[in-house]
Image: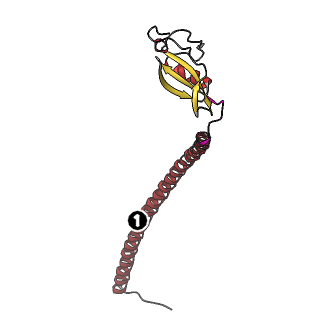
Amino acid sequence: MIRIVTTKRLARLEAEVRAAVEHARQTSGAANAAFARHARELHAATDRVERAEAATSEVGAFLRRALEQVSASEQELLLKAIEVRRLREELAAEPVDGQALTVLFHYGEPHTVYASREDAHADTSTHGYPADHVWGPRGERSPYECRWSCEAFIYSAASNGFRRACVPSAEPVGGAA
């Protein structure tokens, strides 16, 4: 088949090609803009995911530290509860005949009561004496002359209370016999 192309038809085809090229250029521009917009949104979403993962990792580490601290606190609380229970039982226990307490005196005045002489001696380091201080008898000196002194008190059921383990000798008052 032979077709005769006229200049008018050729001009119309050229116009259609130009229109098709312009339409393709506009469509390509719109597609490129849409692709760029989607790429920016994908990049922003990836950034948000990475920040969320970092925050999750940080929160996980914080939670682990917090759980370790809670565990340590629970252990400490358990030990303190055991000690409190022991002390309550000790406090609730009736004194036994012959049970001793040690009283720390400061210039003859009672300062602190201890369950044992060793506890009293160990605590005197907080009052200026070394822990290895050798405690000797007060002798004939007045208790008011001694800076720190320790005396034992023993429970006596007959007197319904504690009495000094070493009863001081009776001294005449004002020269009376």
Residue at 59% across, 45% down:
81
Q: Quadrant of residue 30?
A: bottom left
Q: Is residue 90 visible?
A: yes
Height in image: 34 above or below 8?
Answer: above
Q: Foreground residue, 78 or 154?
A: 154
Residue at 46% across, 56% down:
47
Q: Which residues are magenta?
A: 91-100
Q: Foreground residue, 115 or 170?
A: 170
Q: Quadrant of residue 11?
A: bottom left
Q: Foreground residue, 22 or 125?
A: 125
Magenta highlight: main SS = loop
Q: Position of residue 53 (x, y in %)?
A: 52, 55
Q: Foreground residue, 157 or 87?
A: 157
Coloring scheme used: secondary structure
* Residue behind mark 1: 37
Direction bottom: furthest residue: 1
In the image, 5: left or right of 86? left
Q: Position of residue 137 (x, y in %)?
A: 59, 12
Does the magenta segment cover residue 144? no
